[in-house]
Image (cartoon, rainbow, N blue to C red):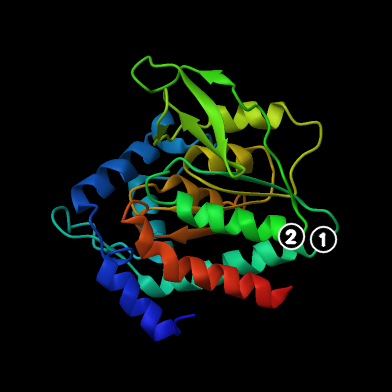
């Protein structure tokens, strides 16, 4: 496992954190959309307080490491690599706590298969090896949501849920698939490990949830701030999959050492 300093350097070099690919303009647009309660940006969450644009920006500066200056409106934005590492360690501790229970029931899902799937697969393998029951509800559930009218279905790869678009796993913010999965279960999961709307819907249902989120996806950080989500790891969610290997190794190693 890389040292913290080496991992920080790796995160910056691969742009998982540091100067990330998401432009400032996109971040601010998404922060404004969440402040206006755009369903596409809410990820299935509701809020108990009135989050203004400035509130969202301040939160994202604190929890994610975007540039705090509201006057910075164009160009580069950032994720603080130390916040990424700290949240990764907190997520590992939360997963270890769940796996320490008797026969834990865990649900995995990702809305960003081109990037984050590799992390979910490694954690799912670890959870299974440690005796967890990995839940796979509503496989084959048919959905017509925000995919330009295309029909999509829930499909699992090694017990990680995604949306399938006629042979290809697709990016989605939609909370409806997770809502369908939870409705199909007789017993609630002990933990959901997810991202995007999959994580938001689980958290909104009151299920213990940890997740990953990019700096242009503020909803999960708002959910964490309101106590609905246990941990959110800030990171660029769509770099080359192999770049996530050191972060994944840190997660798996820390979980394993805690058990």
Who is closer to the viewer here, 23 or 132?
A: 132
Query: Is mark 2 in CB contact (under 8 Å) with mark 1?
Result: yes
Quickly name the residue at label 2.
98
Question: Percent position (x, y) of residue 238?
Answer: 33, 51
Helix, strand or loop under label 2: helix
Position above or below: 124 against 114: below
Please identify the quadrant where the C terminus is shown: bottom right
Question: Percent position (x, y) of residue 38?
Answer: 39, 31
Say which mark, if any, is on residue 101: 1
Residue at figure coordinates x 59%, y 74% from the top left: 253
Quadrant for residue 182, please give it.
Answer: top right
Q: Determine the CA span between mark 2 and mark 1.
A: 6 Å
Quadrant for residue 258, please give it.
Answer: bottom right
Position above or below: 207 against 83: above
Question: Percent position (x, y) of residue 20?
Answer: 25, 60
Crowd rating for badge 2 (residues with CA inside 10 Å; few <14, some 14–19, many 20+): some
Q: Can residue 240 be seen here?
A: yes
Question: Percent position (x, y) of residue 172?
Answer: 42, 34
Residue at figure coordinates x 79%, y 65% from the top left: 100
Residue at figure coordinates x 74%, y 60% from the top left: 98
Who is closer to the viewer here, 107 or 179?
A: 107
Crowd rating for badge 1 (residues with CA inside 10 Å; few <14, some 14–19, many 20+): few
Helix, strand or loop under label 1: loop
Q: Can residue 38 be seen here?
A: no
């Amino acid at each position: 496992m890389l040292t913290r300093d080496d991992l920080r350097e790796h995160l910056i070099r691969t742009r998982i954190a540091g100067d990330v690919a998401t432009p400032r303009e996109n971040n601010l647009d998404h922060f404004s959309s969440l402040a206006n309660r755009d369903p596409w940006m809410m990820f299935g969450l509701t809020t108990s307080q009135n989050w203004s644009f400035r509130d969202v920006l301040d939160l994202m500066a604190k929890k994610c490491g975007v540039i705090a200056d509201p006057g910075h409106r164009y160009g580069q934005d950032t994720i603080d690599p130390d916040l990424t590492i700290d949240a990764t360690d907190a997520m590992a501790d939360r997963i270890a706590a769940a796996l320490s229970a008797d026969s834990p029931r865990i649900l995995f899902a990702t809305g960003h298969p081109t990037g984050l799937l590799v992390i979910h697969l490694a954690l799912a393998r670890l959870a299974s090896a440690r005796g967890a029951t990995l839940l796979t509800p509503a496989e084959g559930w048919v959905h017509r949501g925000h995919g330009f009218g295309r029909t999509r279905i829930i499909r699992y790869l090694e017990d990680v849920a995604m949306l399938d678009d006629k042979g290809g796993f697709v990016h989605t913010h939609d909370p409806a698939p997770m809502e369908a999965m939870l409705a199909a279960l007789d017993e609630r999961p002990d933990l959901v490990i997810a991202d995007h709307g999959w994580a938001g819907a689980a958290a909104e249902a009151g299920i213990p949830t940890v997740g990953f989120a990019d700096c242009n996806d503020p909803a999960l950080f708002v959910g964490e701030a309101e106590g609905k989500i246990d941990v959110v790891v800030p990171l660029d969610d769509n770099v080359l999959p192999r770049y996530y290997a050191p972060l994944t190794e840190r997660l798996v190693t820390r979980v394993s050492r805690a058990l």
